[in-house]
Amino acid sequence: MNKIKTSIKNYWNWRSSSYGVDADKSAAIANQWQSIVHQLINGAPGKRALDIGTGTGQLAVYLARAGYEVTAIDISEAMIAEARRYAADQQLQIDFQTGDAESLDFADQSVDVIVSRNLLWTLPRPYQALMEWRRVLKPGGRLMLSDGLWMNTTWKRVPRLVFKLAKDMGRNGSRISLRFFYTYAALQKRLPFYEGVSLESALALMQAARFEAVTPYDTSRLRIHPYGASVPKSAAPPFFIASATR
């Protein structure tokens, strides 16, 4: 594993215990996400699914609840441990493995569904990742991808970050901001989507990777903003959900 991915893995290992799942925000947000996942994977040719960048296992759980045979991977061993605990609490059988989103250890055309959320921005080679995902999907297989324009402008945030750290010294959110800065400041030039992923960029990338029927999901229809339920809608971060077929 190269130094970039080792740094990323180490950050998310540290972050795993405080990352949480959708239901920690609200049951309504969790139910909304589950409904979207089930809707966008509908029509897949079979029931074998892969969750890439699973984190604490949230999308994998939604897939398992829909009757899929689920494998879920993440670069972080600690995230995988959290995901296993979460799936066990939900009484679901899911195969969690450590793995590299840009170099999948799966045979060609071996899965029916791929889902991935909030991973693209932290990949050094997102185009290679999408090509890998297409490789392992069966013809007619479904892809659901979600990310956002998070604006992780690390160096531009230095004065605000210092003020926040001074104000919130000792709080968990402050420690997360400092550790994020420490890790990603050295990586931002190696991550094409470090500041976030726009819908337009994601659609272009999916098309370049030769996915078909690339379709954005109309997030304006959502009753609750999944990342901004506690702030005014105008202040919530822009995010996207898109689907495609192999």
Image (tube, rainbow, N blue to C red):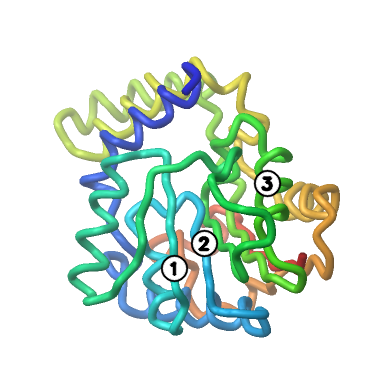
In the rendered image, which residue does mark 2 sit on? 50
What residue sits 64% from the left and 60% below the top?
240
Q: Amino acid at mark 3?
A: Glu
Secondary structure type for disc 1? strand
Question: In the picture provided, is 134 more to the left or to the right than 34?
Answer: right
Classify residue 102 by image quadrant.
top right
The numbered mark, 1 or 3, whose residue comes first in the sequence reads: 1
Q: Quadrant of the C terminus?
A: bottom right
**Camera-side residue: 98 or 13?**
98
What residue sits 32% from the left and 26% below the top?
179
The numbered mark, 1 or 2, whose residue comes first in the sequence reads: 2
Which circle marks residue 70 in the picture? 1
**C-alpha separation, residue under disc 1 versus residue under disc 2:** 6 Å
Which circle marks residue 132 in the picture? 3
What x and y, as percent, mark residue 93?
30, 71
Q: Are marks 1 and 2 in contact (CB under 8 Å)?
A: yes
Secondary structure type for disc 3? helix
Q: Are marks 1 and 3 in contact (CB under 8 Å)?
A: no
What x and y, as percent, mark residue 127?
73, 40
The numbered mark, 2 or 3, whose residue comes first in the sequence reads: 2
**C-alpha separation, residue under disc 2 versus residue under disc 3:** 12 Å
Q: Amino acid at mark 2?
A: Leu
What residue sits 32% from the left and 25% below the top?
178
Secondary structure type for disc 2? strand
Question: In the picture provided, is 94 more to the left or to the right than 190?
Answer: left
Q: Amino acid at mark 1?
A: Val
* Residue found at the far front of this picture: 107
**C-alpha separation, residue under disc 1 versus residue under disc 3:** 18 Å
Classify residue 13 by image quadrant.
top left
What x and y, as percent, mark residue 57?
36, 60
Q: Is residue 47 above or below residue 19?
A: below
What residue sits 20% from the left and 39% below the top?
172
